[in-house]
Amino acid sequence: MTRRIRLGVNVDHVATIRNARGGSAPDPLRAALLAIEAGADGITAHLREDRRHIRDDDMLRLKERISKPLNFEMAATEQMLDIALRVKPHAVCLVPERRTERTTEGGLDVIGGHDHLVPFVDELRRAGVRVSLFIEPGAEAIDAAASIRAPVVELHTGAWCHAVEIGDLEAAEKEFRRIVAAAAHTGERGLECHAGHGLDYATARRIAALPQIVELNIGHFLVGEAVFVGLAETIRQMRLAIDEGRSAAVP
C-alpha cells in the first residue's frame, strides 16, 4: 500500500484579507491552528520581500504556536536566509519571486541559478532545516535540483491547473503528462516529491494517484472555499479528495 500524502495548508491569503483593511483580523495563526485541528499535516507560509501578506511576526508566531511542521516559502536572498535561520522552521521551500506578479508564476531557474542556490541549500541543511526547491516539472530541472543537493522538489502544477480551469483539455493532458514523467524522475534521482499551485478538489484527487507524491501544498483554493463552507469543512473535504486519489495509486 502506498503511504498517505501529507497536506500542507498555505495560510498566505488569510493574511491577504487581513492586510486589505489593516488591523489583526483575520489572523493567519488562528487559521493555521484550525487547519491542523481539521486534518492538515503542516502549515505553509510565504514571507515575500514586499510583505504583501505574511509578515515577520506571523512567521515567529506560527513557529512558536503550531504543533505541526512549518514550511517557510522564501526567495533565495540573504535577508530571507537570515530570517529563516532565526525562525528555524521545519522546512524551507525556495521559490522564485517578482514584485510585479500576483502569485508565483513558475518554478525556480535551477539551471541558470545553480551556483547562486548551492550555498543557500547548504547553509539551511547545516542548520537542520529540510530544503525543497519549487521547480517546473521537467527532467532537466530535477537533475539540476539533485546537483544542488536539495533533498526535496516541489513540482509547479500551475500550468496544468490553469488549463483544467479554462477547459483546455488538450493542454491539460499535455501538462499532466509532464507532471507524471517528472514525478517518476524524482524517484529515479532519489528525491522526495511534493507538488502544489492552483490545486482544487478535482486536481488534488487526480495528482494524489501518482505514487511518488509525498506532499501537496494548497492555499488559495482552500481560503476561497472557506468563504462559503468554512475553513475546517474545506480542509476535511480536501483531505478526503486526496485520500480518495491516493487509494487509486499504483505502487
Image (cartoon, helix red, strand yellow):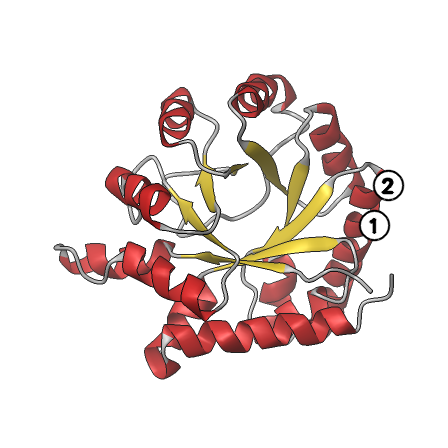
Q: Is residue 110 above or below residue 250?
A: above
Residue 237 appears in the figure: yes
Residue at 46% x, 68% y: name it: 221
Q: Position of residue 234 (x, y in %)?
A: 45, 76
Q: Which residue is mark 1?
A: 184
The answer to whether mark 2 and mark 1 are in CB contact below 8 A is yes
The mark total stands at 2
Q: Position of residue 159 (x, y in %)?
A: 62, 58
In-image side of 235 versus 14 (left or right): right
Q: Is residue 25 above or below residue 123?
A: below
Q: Which residue is mark 2?
A: 188
In-image side of 249 versus 71 (left or right): right
Instruction: Name the amino acid, label 1.
Output: Ala
Residue at 70% x, 65% y: name it: 208
Q: Is residue 69 above or below residue 219?
A: above
Residue at 33% x, 77% y: name it: 227
Between 28 and 115, the one nearer to me in the picture: 28
Q: Secondary structure at mark 2?
A: helix
Residue at 34% x, 35% y: name it: 49
How many residues crowd around disc 2 within 10 Å: few (fewer than 14), some, or many (20 or more)?
Answer: few
Instruction: Name the amino acid, label 2.
Output: Glu
